[in-house]
Image (cartoon, helix red, strand yellow):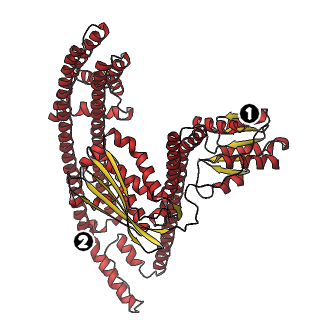
C-alpha cells in the first residue's frame, strides 16, 4: 500500500493540492466580493444620508427665506428640496411591508437622488440585514426624522397660508418660523444619531469581514503547509538522490547514475538526469521568459507615458477653452469701458487671467515641475503695483468678512526691480488669500522691507500677518506638504485641498528664497518669505509700458467659416471678427462645417480640433479630399491644446496655420490676412 502511494504521480498530488487550494481561495473570493459589495452599499447609505441631510437643511433654509421674502418662488424651492427625503421615506415604508414592491422601493431611492447604480445594493442591504440591531436602529431613526419633517411641512403649510392671506404680521410669521427652527435642531440630532449608528454598523461589519477573511487565510496557509510537508516527504528521497548525482557530475564523474526509488515524475527525472540538453533548454527558456518580461515592461511604460500625454492634452483643452472665453470677452469689454475705476478692474482681470495661463502651463508640464525645472522670467516691474493689485483682487472678500487690510512698503525698495512678477503675485495671492480665509475678525497686515541692498541686488522680506485661527506648533512644518492642512477641522470648516502652501514653498525655494511662519492657536499667523531681486537700470522701460502696435487689419469682404462647438467661444470669435469687418458663419461641428463649405464659398476656415460627431482633424482631411476648386481653402487650427507636437500634427494633416486659445486678436487678424492674400 505504501509503495502504491509512493508511485502516485506528482502531478496527481499537485492536482489534489491545487483543487483544495482553489476551493478555499474561491470561498475567500466569494466572501471578499460579498464584503466589498456590502461595504459599497454602506458607503452609498452614507452618501444618501448626506443627500437627505443637505436637502432637509436646504428646505428649512428656503423656508426661512420665504418667511422674510414672501416670494412664492422661495416656497416652491422649499417644496422642491423636500422631494429627496420624501422619496427616501417612500422606500422605507415600502420595505417595511411583508411583501415589498421592489420597483416602488427603487423608485423612491432614485427620487431621493441616490445614484441608480447604488440603489439595488442599498435595498439588498436593508432586506438582508433588517434584523441586525444597527439596521433596526437606523430605520427607527429614519422614521422619527420623517415624522419630524412632516411637522416641518405642516408648519410650512401654515406659513404659506399666513403669507398668502397677507393679513399676518411679520412678528406672527417669525413665531411660527421659530417652531420650524426647533424641529430643524431636532432633525439635526436625529441625523447625527443616524450617522453614528451607521458608522457603528460599518465597523461591526468590517470586524466580521476581517475575522472571516483572517480565518480563511489561516485555513489556507495551514492547509498549504500540511500538504507541502506531506508531498515533500514523498519526493525528498528521490530529490536527494538527484542532488547527490548532480554533485558527482559537477566533480566530473559523468558516468554517475542516480538511483530510481519510484515511478513518479521524480523517477522519470532521475532516468533522464544525464540528458544534459534539458538543462540547456531550460536556460534558454528562462532567457526567453526574461526577454518577454522586459518587452512587456517596456510596452507598459510606453502605454503609461501615452496615457499621461493624453491626460495633459485633455486637461489643457478643458481649462483653456473657458479661459479663452474669459480673457476674450474681458478684452472686448476693456475696449468699451471709459470709467478709470472700471478699467482698473478689467485690467486686473486680464492680468490675472494671463498669470493663470502661465501657471497652467507649468502645472500641465508635470514632469518638468517634479524635476524643479520651472522657468522663471527676469523682467522689470514695480513691487508696489504688484502688492496693491493683489490687495484689490481680495478686497471684496475682506469687505464681506469686515476684515481690514493694511499695507506698508519700505521706501528703500527700488521703484523698478527685475524678477518674475507673475510668480511673486502667485505667492502673495496664496498667502493673503489664506489670511482672509482663516480670519474671522480683526485685520491683515502686509509689509515689504528691504533687508539687503548691495547696489546690484536687493533682498526683500514680505510679511503677511493676520488675527485668524492660528496654527499649532507641531503642524507648522506639515502645512507646507502637499494635500495637508493644519487639522482635519480646518479642512471641514474652511475647505481647500491643501496645495497652496506647498506650491508657495516650491516657488520661493526655486528662486533661492526662504519661507517661514510664526503662529499660535487663537492668536493669528505671521507668514514671511525672502526673495532676491536684481535692481533694474534707470533707462529700462517701466513695466506696463507697451510699444504702440500697428493698426488692426480690416476684414471687409473676407468671408470666414468658424467651426466651433463651444457656444461661448462661438460668440467670442464672431464678435472679434465682426468688430473688424469680417463676414462670419458658424458650424457647430466638423460635419456641419463640411456640409456648409460644400454648398457655399468662403475665403478661410477657422477649425476647432475637438468637436462632436466629426472633429477638426477628420473635417480637414475630408476638405483636402474635395475636388481641386474646393480643396485648397486656407484652414487655421484654433484649439485649446497646448502640448508639444500639436502644431506639427495640424500641418501634417493639411492645415495651414495654428493659433492656440486664448488667442490674441491681432495675431488672428494677421494670420487670416496672410493666408487669404496668399490664396
Residue 311 appears in the figure: no
Q: Residue at x 74, y 33 (%)?
A: 596
Determine whether, in the image, residue 645 is placed left or right of residue 580.
Answer: left
Near-viewer residue (3 or 212): 212
Look at mark 1 in the image and give the residue it sits on: 596
Near-viewer residue (600 or 221): 600
Eyeballing the image, is 380 above or below 278? Answer: above
Local crowd size for mark 2, using a 10 Å CA cut-off: few (<14), some (14–19), many (≥20)? few
Q: Where does residue 553 sit, x and y in percent of width and height? A: 74, 45
Position of the N terminus by quadrant = bottom left
* Mark 1: secondary structure: helix
Q: Where does residue 672 sit, x and y in percent of width and height? A: 74, 46
Question: Which residue is situated farthest in the right direction here?
Answer: 629
Question: Which residue is situated farthest in the bottom direction here?
Answer: 252
The answer to which image quadrant residue 139 occupies is top left
Residue 537 appears in the figure: yes
Could you tell me how far apart the alpha carbons at marks 2 and 1 are, in whole angstroms? 83 Å
The answer to which image quadrant residue 575 occupies is top right
Look at mark 2 in the image and give the residue it sits on: 233
Eyeballing the image, is 158 above or below 484? Answer: above
* Mark 2: secondary structure: helix
Determine whether, in the image, residue 105 is placed left or right of residue 565.
Answer: left
Q: Where does residue 296 sit, x and y in percent of width and height? A: 50, 64
Q: Nearer the viewer, mark 2 or mark 1?
A: 1
Near-viewer residue (254 or 21): 21
Amino acid at each position: 500500500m505504501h509503495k502504491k502511494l509512493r508511485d502516485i504521480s506528482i502531478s496527481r498530488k499537485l492536482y489534489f493540492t491545487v483543487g483544495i487550494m482553489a476551493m478555499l481561495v474561491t470561498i475567500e473570493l466569494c466572501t471578499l466580493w460579498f464584503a466589498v459589495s456590502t461595504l459599497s452599499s454602506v458607503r452609498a447609505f452614507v452618501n444618501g444620508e448626506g443627500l437627505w441631510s443637505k436637502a432637509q437643511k436646504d428646505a428649512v433654509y428656503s423656508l426661512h427665506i420665504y418667511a422674510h421674502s414672501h416670494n412664492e418662488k422661495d416656497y416652491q424651492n422649499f417644496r422642491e428640496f423636500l422631494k429627496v427625503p420624501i422619496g427616501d421615506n417612500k422606500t422605507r415604508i415600502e420595505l417595511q411591508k411583508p411583501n415589498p414592491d421592489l420597483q416602488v422601493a427603487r423608485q423612491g431611492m432614485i427620487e431621493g437622488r441616490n445614484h441608480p447604480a447604488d440603489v439595488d445594493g442599498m435595498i439588498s442591504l436593508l432586506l438582508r440585514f433588517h434584523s441586525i440591531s444597527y439596521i433596526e436602529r437606523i430605520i427607527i431613526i429614519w422614521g422619527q426624522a420623517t415624522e419630524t419633517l412632516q411637522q416641518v411641512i405642516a408648519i410650512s403649510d401654515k406659513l404659506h397660508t399666513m403669507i398668502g392671506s397677507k393679513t399676518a404680521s411679520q412678528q406672527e410669521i417669525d413665531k411660527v418660523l421659530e417652531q420650524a427652527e426647533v424641529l430643524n435642531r431636532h432633525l439635526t440630532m436625529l441625523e447625527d444619531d443616524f450617522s453614528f449608528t451607521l458608522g457603528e454598523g460599518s465597523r461591526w461589519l468590517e470586524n466580521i469581514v476581517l475575522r472571516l477573511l483572517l480565518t480563511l487565510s489561516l485555513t489556507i496557509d495551514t492547509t498549504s503547509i500540511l500538504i507541502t510537508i506531506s508531498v515533500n516527504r514523498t519526493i525528498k528521497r528521490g530529490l536527494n538522490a538527484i542532488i547527490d548525482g548532480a554533485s558527482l557530475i559537477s566533480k566530473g564523474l559523468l558516468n554517475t547514475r542516480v538511483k530510481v526509488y519510484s515511478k513518479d515524475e521524480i523517477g522519470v527525472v532521475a532516468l533522464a538526469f544525464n540528458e544534459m540538453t534539458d538543462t540547456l533548454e531550460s536556460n534558454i527558456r528562462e532567457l526567453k521568459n526574461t526577454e518577454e518580461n522586459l518587452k512587456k515592461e517596456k510596452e507598459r511604460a510606453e502605454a503609461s507615458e501615452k496615457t499621461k500625454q493624453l491626460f495633459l492634452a485633455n486637461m489643457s483643452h478643458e481649462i483653456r477653452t473657458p479661459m479663452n472665453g474669459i480673457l476674450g470677452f474681458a478684452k472686448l469689454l476693456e475696449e468699451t469701458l471709459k470709467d478709470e475705476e472700471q478699467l482698473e478692474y478689467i485690467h486686473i482681470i486680464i492680468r490675472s487671467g494671463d498669470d493663470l495661463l502661465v501657471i497652467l502651463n507649468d502645472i500641465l508640464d508635470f514632469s518638468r515641475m517634479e524635476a524643479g525645472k520651472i522657468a522663471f522670467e527676469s523682467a522689470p516691474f514695480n513691487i508696489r503695483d504688484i502688492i496693491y493689485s493683489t490687495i484689490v483682487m481680495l478686497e471684496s472678500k475682506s469687505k464681506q468678512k469686515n476684515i481690514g487690510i493694511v499695507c506698508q512698503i519700505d521706501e528703500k525698495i527700488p521703484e523698478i526691480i527685475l524678477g518674475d512678477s507673475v510668480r511673486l503675485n502667485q505667492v502673495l495671492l496664496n498667502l493673503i488669500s489664506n489670511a482672509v480665509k482663516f480670519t474671522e475678525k480683526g485685520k491683515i497686515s502686509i509689509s515689504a522691507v528691504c533687508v539687503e541692498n548691495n547696489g546690484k541686488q536687493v533682498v526683500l522680506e514680505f510679511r503677511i500677518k493676520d488675527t485668524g485661527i492660528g496654527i499649532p506648533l507641531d503642524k507648522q512644518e506639515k502645512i507646507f506638504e502637499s494635500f495637508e492642512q493644519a487639522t482635519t477641522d480646518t479642512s471641514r470648516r474652511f475647505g481647500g485641498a491643501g496645495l497652496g502652501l506647498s506650491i508657495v514653498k516650491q516657488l520661493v525655494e526655486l528662486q533661492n528664497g526662504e519661507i517661514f511662519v510664526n503662529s499660535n492657536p487663537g492668536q493669528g499667523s505671521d507668514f514671511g518669505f525672502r526673495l532676491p531681486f536684481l535692481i533694474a537700470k534707470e533707462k529700462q522701460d517701466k513695466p506696463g509700458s507697451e510699444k504702440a502696435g500697428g493698426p488692426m487689419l480690416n476684414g471687409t469682404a473676407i468671408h470666414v467659416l468658424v467651426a466651433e462647438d463651444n457656444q461661448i467661444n462661438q460668440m467670442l470669435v464672431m464678435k472679434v471678427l465682426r468688430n473688424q469687418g469680417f463676414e462670419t458663419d458658424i458650424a457647430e461641428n466638423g460635419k456641419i462645417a463640411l456640409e456648409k463649405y460644400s454648398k457655399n464659398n468662403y475665403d478661410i476656415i477657422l477649425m476647432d480640433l475637438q468637436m462632436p460627431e466629426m472633429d477638426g482633424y477628420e473635417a480637414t482631411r475630408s476638405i483636402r479630399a474635395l475636388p481641386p476648386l474646393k480643396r485648397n481653402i486656407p484652414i487655421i487650427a484654433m484649439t485649446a491644446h497646448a502640448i508639444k507636437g500639436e502644431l506639427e500634427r495640424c500641418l501634417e494633416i493639411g492645415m495651414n496655420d495654428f493659433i492656440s486659445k486664448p488667442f490674441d486678436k491681432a495675431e488672428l487678424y494677421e494670420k487670416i490676412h496672410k493666408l487669404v492674400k496668399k490664396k
